[in-house]
Amino acid sequence: VKIAKTTKPIKTVGTVGTVKMSIRNPTLDNFYSADIAIIGAGPVGLFSVFQAGMLGMSSVVIDALSHIGGQCTALYPEKPIYDIPAYTKISAANLISNLDKQNSPFKPKYMLDQVVNLISVDEKSHWILRTSQDNYIKSKAVIIAAGCGAFKPNMPPLEGIDEFENKTVFYNVGNTDIFKGKKIVIAGGGDSALDWALSLAEIADKIYIVHRRRNFKAMDNTVKKIEEISTGSGVIEFIIPYQLYEIHGEFGILHSIDVINLEGDIMNLKADYLLPFFGLKMDLGPIIDWQLNLNKNHITVNPENMMTNLEGIFAIGDVSDYPGKLKLILTGFSEAAVACHNAYKYVFPDKALHFVYSTNNPIIL
Amino acid sequence: VKIAKTTKPIKTVGTVGTVKMSIRNPTLDNFYSADIAIIGAGPVGLFSVFQAGMLGMSSVVIDALSHIGGQCTALYPEKPIYDIPAYTKISAANLISNLDKQNSPFKPKYMLDQVVNLISVDEKSHWILRTSQDNYIKSKAVIIAAGCGAFKPNMPPLEGIDEFENKTVFYNVGNTDIFKGKKIVIAGGGDSALDWALSLAEIADKIYIVHRRRNFKAMDNTVKKIEEISTGSGVIEFIIPYQLYEIHGEFGILHSIDVINLEGDIMNLKADYLLPFFGLKMDLGPIIDWQLNLNKNHITVNPENMMTNLEGIFAIGDVSDYPGKLKLILTGFSEAAVACHNAYKYVFPDKALHFVYSTNNPIIL
């Protein structure tokens, strides 16, 4: 679906949202075009690719996570789901993999690890989306299937932390080599915190586990192993019950972290890295500013066509709201079908949509 | 779901429809009770059993056919369906079998080979349905998932034919022994007509195939075999292009059939049996008289809850109509969920419905 040529910059005539969208040098490499831009690669977004495809419409799917599947993949891949029609039981991971297979005739373009941060409209009434990876997508219709929003790590409320993020403060761990021989503060009391403490204990000089409670929400076995290291080599040290209080350093280089307990005692921990693991939150993000009609963080749509108050922008799945709405995956599938059938007239304004049973659809046969 | 005791006849306080419902001796054997009566055992009716079950509601399903699956089973069992979510491709027969398996935790009660011909309401606002097999079903909610209606054979427009039906005139063949050494008129030019001609030629004395065209809509191979018998033993004789014209006999005993061609020539065929195979039609049947709001043979519902104009009667799937309606199986699944969630308050008027993900639903675990 990559556009063959972009001869000149896109001129936007209007901006939806509070921030003026500036197209910075669109090039062949970061400019995409599709009939429909789908925001969210959860089950409902994925099924929209199929429904669009069956109606002869191309699509791109944008998602904040580095994989398709949304919550199904990120939060509970192994959990069995019982209410997908014609499946006695299917794991969330298999549901996603089957939906992906169903999409394969349409060669879906998944743009992962990025959120749509701006939306605009060009002089031909195309929607232009810009993602956080500075990709641009031009489309005639947009389907928002963003679930409860994009996943984001919960951040500790430390003043000035943004200066250190992705330099010495990480919310998820990529390359572990950088931690070799270093002092690390790991904050949090869940599985992620303790698993990483255990894993990094093999290469780090010192690991402080800062947790505001004495109890951990992690596997007993993991806690036990960490306690052994703590009383043994001492590479891991529990700082409990303490919370993060202040961050010290400059130019993104961390020097130390102050932690505080309920009595107000402050302790200073020398540290090269801070890894806060406070779980994920879901955040509708910039979509909230798109001048869409909202009802408590949900996008209000007309259930007849799943369209929002903006022409050609649809919202389906958990993010959408209308009278009688049920938040079920199977309901989202149906909404995907409705949205795609109604997006058709924006993609092909001059063509009438003729109903064809999938059995006889020449597109898939 | 069979009721344990019925001590006295049900008193009905109101009748929906044009015919007064008379409860003829309800006994333990023909009286059933369930939270929800589902009319139609197609994919959408079947999924309603599951949705009802997940919410703790029992159901019975009534269908005109002798098997579950509706059109999927009757018309195109081998056809692949491509737009069932998370199935790259599934045959209609497998779709039905999987939906049936999904229902198994709820031990569904399928009442087949019967149509609901009357509906009434008792003094406690329960719905009472009577079927053509003289079964009674008492329920607090009714879900009509009747598709395009019940399947019925198309009948030839012969005066007085009803006197012979199920005696010497059959629209489908059960026990073939009765045809041994007999003269049979088979009417029609499709697969059913020719397949039965071929099959009964082995035992019958004579078979006339009456068809108004010279061409048959059947497998070439079948036509060829029949032509061989026709020119060989002569047990089969083509009467083409002729149509049925008049039926002769008395007390249900057939004597002969008059057939006529386009020129008006009449021919008399001595016959013991008439088997008309003019295909199936779908007919909404008595439902049409239930004082439901209709729009061109479809039942108008409120899409917020899928309820008809009658309290506690819902309509879903192809039979239902609302603005933006898409006639897709997957849409019917979603409608089943909506109908069941809203039927809940009729079944349990004093209980609030709490949302539970299927993954954690104690009912199925």
Image (cartoon, coloured by chain):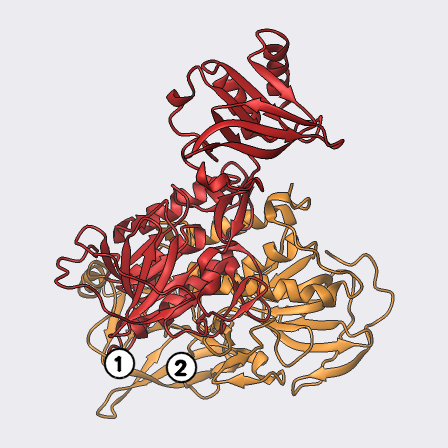
Chain colours: A red, B orange
Q: Residue furthest right?
A: B7
Residue A203 is tagged as none
Q: CA distance from mark 2 to mark 1?
A: 12 Å
Q: Residue at x 64, y 14 (%)?
A: A227
Q: Is residue B360 left or right of residue B140?
A: left
Quarter of the picture containing the N terminus of chain B is: bottom right
Q: Chain of mark 2?
A: B
Q: The C terminus of chain B lies in which quarter of the figure? A: top right
Q: Nearer the viewer, residue B341 or B103?
A: B341
- Amino acid type of the residue that numbered disc 2 sits on in the rendered structure: Pro
Residue B123 in the image: x percent, y percent? 82, 77
User: Going by the image, does A193 lie left or right of A44?
Assistant: right
Q: Earlier in the sequence, mark 2 or mark 1?
A: 2
Residue at which label 1 appears = B212
Q: Secondary structure at mark 1?
A: loop
Q: Is any atom of residue A189 visible in this view?
A: no
Q: Position of residue A149 (x, y in %)?
A: 49, 53
Furthest residue in direction top, as rendered: A232
Name the disc covering residue B156, or none.
2
